[in-house]
Image (cartoon, rainbow, N blue to C red):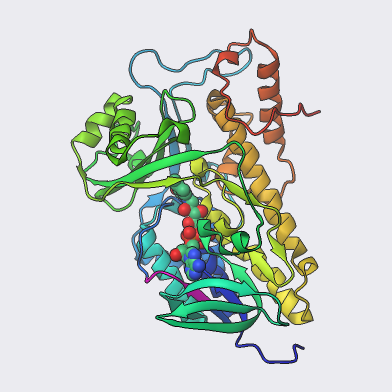
Amino acid sequence: MDSIKPDFDIGIIGGGPGGASLAAYLAKAGVSCVVFEREIFPRPHVGESLVPSSTRVFNDLGFIEQMEEAKFPHKLGAVWTAKEQGRPYRYAYKDGLNPDSFADVRFEERPQEGVQMPYTYHVDRGKFDLMLLQHANKLGASVYEGVKVSGVDFSPEQPAVHFSMGRKEMSVNVRMVADASGRNTMLGNQLKLKQMDPVFNQYAIHTWFAGFNRHALATSDEQGDYIYIHFLPTSNSWIWQIPITDDITSIGVVTQKKNFTGSKEDREKFFWDAVDTRPKLAEALRAAQRVKNFKEEGDYSYSMKQICGDRFMLVGDAGRFVDPIFSTGVSIALNSSRFAQRDILGALERNDFSRASFNEFETTIGRGTKNWYDFINVYYRLNVLFTYFITDSRYRLDVLKLLQGDVYDDAAPPVLDKMKQMVSDVERDPRHPWHKLLVDLTANEFVPVG
Ligand SMILES: Cc1cc2nc3c(=O)[nH]c(=O)nc-3n(C[C@H](O)[C@H](O)[C@H](O)COP(=O)(O)OP(=O)(O)OC[C@H]3O[C@@H](n4cnc5c(N)ncnc54)[C@H](O)[C@@H]3O)c2cc1C
């Protein structure tokens, strides 16, 4: 036992999905924990489309009923579109289907253990994050909003979490700290663990529209509530289309940061120029009303040298951020709490908060984020490969498994190895019909497998 009784067992920095779900898990297990959140909720946040593996966490936390009552749009699947006018993106490949300018999946095509519904949700993050934080509070977690943590002192036996309240500097002692401060990466910065991604340097500009016709590029009625990824002709650039309510749709343009250099006005012009490369989409968007200011996000891909250590863990975006192309961030934050709480409960039982106690968490999250990273890497390197795999019945369900967020159980999912192998083949063969489609955004050349 510690020689002094701490103020709380666990201190959690940040009340987004990572921090709130961890607090809810711990409070449910009877652990004393406190969340420090610098904002007063609700506050807006990017990251509005979930993947189905989030449902396991909602089930564990008894949160499904609230998700249903909130009437968040049900996300039944996803659609990818490419140029819809003129010559479609069509590339014949020797033994496969012709990837077309359109691909779609329904989540119910692949049953998922522990996920009882054929859909997940799109959420207004202001509302969703508030609900989850309040849920943690109801389960017994202490929640302080409007309280910004300035640092953690690890020198005493029990870490001291420092924060200010008004002009008053204060601190509480805890047995361990979980940093869930998102891309602010509070502890990662303090402990100098953060490494910016050497390759992915993406930039996003996004807003909400009312009255946008979400069926503008759909092929069925149901697809109005799918997430859409609209490829743009510029390399590594795409647009998201995410339903927020019956009437509101979130639209964001993602591209390489080097494509943006101008002033704020230039950037808004960039948004519209990007949209204009997809005429049907542009027509539908221009007929709608923008109901929010544009918001920008940049420099967002990084990893940490380690995601846990003696008396600390990094959860969700505070531990790593991988490009959002597959809508994975909230699911990773929720599931990292799911894995983190198991190790934390074990550490509390043994009163051992050394890094070794969090080994399972570190290994599992390392595996999951590596799989996401590899998947995103092949995707950006050769877009057409993704549509090829998703439209080929031999690989479809294995790709869908990744898209559903089931990335934690295989160290190396066979379908990813196959994708990497094909990228290597295309890279080595200048006469391959896809060779000219390779783009340079990739962390390293893929090592051929097998
Ligand atoms: C362009 C873009 C698009 C995205 N699209 C998607 C998507 O479609 N789907 C998806 O799942 N994810 C998406 N994401 C990712 C998603 O936004 C994050 O992965 C998710 O919000 C992570 O949750 P979190 O709890 O780890 O961090 P956050 O949600 O960022 O929460 C962190 C909280 O910590 C608080 N905080 C920060 N510093 C301090 C401090 N010092 N003291 C106290 N509190 C602090 C913040 O105020 C914040 O509330 C996208 C991200 C980007 C950049």
Q: Residue at x 59, y 36 (%)?
A: 199
- Relative to 317, residue 322 above or below: above
Q: Is residue 399 above or below residue 367?
A: above
Is residue 250 among the parts visible in the rendering? no
Asked if one can make out residue 101 in the rendered structure from this viewpoint, the answer is: yes
**Is 352 placed left or right of 12 in the picture?**
right
The x and y percentages for residue 70 are 35, 64
Q: Nearer the viewer, residue 401 or 376?
A: 376
47 left or right, relative to 367: left
Q: In the picture, residue 189 is in which quadrant? A: bottom right
Question: Which residue sits at x=63%, y=15%?
Answer: 95
Task: Looking at the picture, tell me which residue is in the foreground, 8 or 405.
Answer: 8
Is 239 above or below relative to 233? below
Left or right of 113: which side holds 99?
Answer: left
| Residue drawn at 61 percent across, 73 percent down | 152
Please state the horizontal and vertical placement of residue 81, each as a whole percent of the image. 41, 29
Seen as rendered, the residue at the extreme bottom is: 4
> Looking at the image, how many numbered discs can be counted on the residues?
0
Which of the two residues, 381 or 117, is positioned nearer the viewer here?
381
Judge whether residue 187 is colored magenta: no
Q: Quadrant of the rendered structure where residue 186 is?
A: bottom right
Residue 269: image location, x then y, percent? 28, 33
Q: Quadrant of the C terminus?
A: top right
Dividing the picture into quadrants, the one containing residue 77 is top left
Magenta stretch: residue 39 in it? yes
Rendered-image quadrant of the N terminus: bottom right
First to last magenta residue range: 35-40
Q: Is residue 227 above or below residue 27?
A: above
Residue 289: where, in percent of width, then height? 19, 43
22 vs 223, left or right, is: right
